[in-house]
Image (cartoon, grey):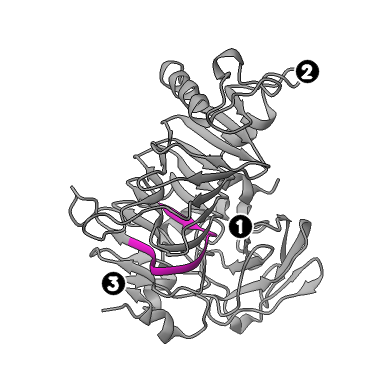
């Protein structure tokens, strides 16, 4: 598995699925299994193993929560759900994933949220992966004041706690009057919403006092704002805001797609700047992008060419972490196919790349050529960063990752030098 995928795939998933098993495949480390729909008797008489799975998600989560509280595990306690034939109807009270618990969907099971207020609630250091989450057509979502006060998922991050929502499809009602995800608190290096598809909502992600990293997500048919940013109710200005993209760190940020967005792309009502670089806004018109953001939002280095699952995006950087200049004629190939550099994002974009191993090679006048083998997935955007070095500059050559490790001091001290030397317009 490629290192970039591993970075965003928390290690608890790999351990839960592949480690700790006995020869019979019956026992897995700190893991319970669920198969069937809620409401069927018999949970107390089985063991939550593969051959004797629990039959309701809430019951399995309650057992995992008790174990996480009384017997904390480094990788947490996991509940793996396999249900591909019958949608799981969540109880009116919703589903709670307690701190230290991971809820993992196998074969993308469907969870239906039945009505007003029902949602999946994620505590700090909980993780949810691989579900098709749907708001029922009869769901009532408006309170007495007409506010949009039902969310399909509520995440609660905390300092130092890894909390993630990954590879989920979250679909609202035909009326599009729900919020897909509300997230409270958390740091961007620890709290993330990644590789999710968010469709038919008033708000896609509403972040309150949160530094959540929103990356490689697709927003479709949002009516008010795809991303809404506000302070937490009990906090003042100066707190963190979401990370939607940093053009100097595309392997871990940005690469979101916005399609058929009737409302705003980003609505920021705080005094802080939201970094939203390196995204596909569904248009190459800078004025249109500017008109569909509110507040202080940096949308520079956007893609003028559409990206999506199966796309490979390659960024070429020099040893200081700045984009390699067009003046030195940079080139990039993927498995021998030459790419064309996007004029705004300064990346090379390859469409419809087949899944599997591919060789990326890059060169520029006056630089040593570099290459890296990457694993491409058809279900996500793959980002690659290659650092080109000049001959005789010391040990900063080699692959992008080796160059970053070797030149850590240089990058640390120069920081955002390119951006400081090339000021960008900000929204007033």
Crowding around mark 2 (Cα neighbors within 10 Å: few <14, some 14 to 19, many 20+) is: few
Of the pair 274 and 339, the residue shown nearer to us: 274
Can residue 395 be seen at all in this image of the molecule?
A: no
What secondary structure do most residues of the magenta stretch adopt?
strand
User: What range of the chain is rendered magenta?
Assistant: 212-228
Of the pair 41 and 385, the residue shown nearer to us: 41
Contact between marks 1 and 2 (CB within 8 A): the answer is: no
Q: From what the image shows, is residue 379 above or below residue 39?
A: below
- Say left or right for 248 vs 356: left
Task: Measure the C-alpha gap from mark 1 to mark 2.
Answer: 46 Å
The image quadrant of residue 416 is bottom left
Residue tagged 3: 295
Contact between marks 2 and 3 (CB within 8 A): the answer is: no
At 70% from the left and 55% from the top, the residue drawn is 377
Residue tagged 1: 396
In what element is the residue under mark 2? loop
Q: Residue furthest front?
A: 138
Let me know if residue 334 is in the magenta part: no
Residue 405 percent location from the top left of the image:
56, 50
- Say left or right for 351 vs 212: right
Contact between marks 3 and 1 (CB within 8 A): the answer is: no
- Say left or right for 6 vs 231: right
Q: Earlier in the sequence, mark 3 or mark 1?
A: 3
Q: In which quarter of the image is the C terminus?
A: bottom left
Task: Measure the C-alpha gap from mark 2 to mark 3.
Answer: 57 Å
Residue tagged 2: 23
Q: Earlier in the sequence, mark 2 or mark 3?
A: 2
Crowding around mark 1 (Cα neighbors within 10 Å: few <14, some 14 to 19, many 20+) is: many
At 38% from the left and 51% from the top, the residue drawn is 151
- Say left or right for 314 vs 222: right
Residue 93 percent location from the top left of the image:
38, 36
């Amino acid at each position: 598995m490629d290192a970039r995928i591993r970075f965003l795939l928390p290690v608890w998933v790999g351990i839960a699925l592949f480690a700790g098993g006995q020869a019979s495949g019956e026992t897995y480390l700190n893991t319970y299994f669920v198969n069937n729909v809620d409401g069927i008797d018999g949970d107390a008489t089985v063991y939550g193993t593969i051959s004797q799975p629990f039959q309701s998600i809430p019951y399995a989560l309650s057992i995992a929560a008790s174990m996480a509280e009384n017997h904390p595990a480094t990788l947490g306690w996991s509940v793996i759900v396999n249900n591909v034939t019958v949608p799981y109807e969540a109880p009116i009270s919703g589903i709670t994933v307690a701190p230290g618990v991971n809820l993992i969907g196998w074969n993308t099971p469907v969870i239906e949220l039945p009505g007003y207020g029902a949602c999946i609630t994620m505590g700090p250091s909980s993780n949810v992966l691989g579900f098709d989450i749907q708001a029922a057509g009869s769901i009532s979502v408006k309170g007495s004041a007409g506010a949009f006060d039902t969310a399909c998922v509520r995440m609660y991050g905390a300092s130092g706690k890894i909390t993630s929502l990954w590879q989920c499809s979250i679909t609202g009602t035909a009326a599009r009057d729900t919020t897909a995800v509300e997230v409270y608190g958390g740091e961007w290096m620890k709290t993330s919403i990644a590789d999710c598809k968010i469709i038919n909502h008033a708000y896609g992600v509403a972040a309150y006092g949160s530094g959540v990293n929103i990356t490689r997500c697709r927003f479709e048919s949002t009516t008010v704002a795809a991303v809404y940013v506000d302070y937490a109710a009990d906090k003042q200005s100066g707190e963190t805001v979401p990370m939607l993209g940093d053009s100097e760190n595309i392997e871990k940020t940005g690469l979101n797609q916005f399609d058929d967005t009737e409302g705003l792309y980003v609505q920021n009502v705080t005094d802080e700047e939201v970094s939203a670089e390196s995204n596909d806004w569904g248009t190459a018109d800078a004025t249109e992008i500017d008109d569909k953001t509110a507040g202080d939002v940096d949308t520079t280095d956007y893609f003028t060419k559409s990206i999506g699952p199966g796309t490979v995006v390659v960024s070429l950087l020099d040893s200081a972490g700045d984009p390699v200049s067009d003046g030195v004629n940079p080139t990039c190939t993927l498995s021998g196919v030459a790419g064309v550099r996007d004029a705004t994002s300064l990346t090379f974009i390859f469409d419809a790349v087949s899944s599997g191993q591919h060789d990326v090679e890059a060169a520029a006048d006056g630089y040593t050529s570099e290459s890296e083998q990457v694993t491409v997935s058809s279900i996500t955007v793959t980002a690659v960063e290659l650092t080109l070095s000049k001959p005789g500059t010391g040990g900063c050559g080699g692959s992008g990752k080796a160059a970053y490790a070797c030149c850590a001091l240089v990058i640390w001290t120069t920081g955002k030098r390119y951006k400081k030397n090339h000021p960008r317009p900000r929204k007033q």
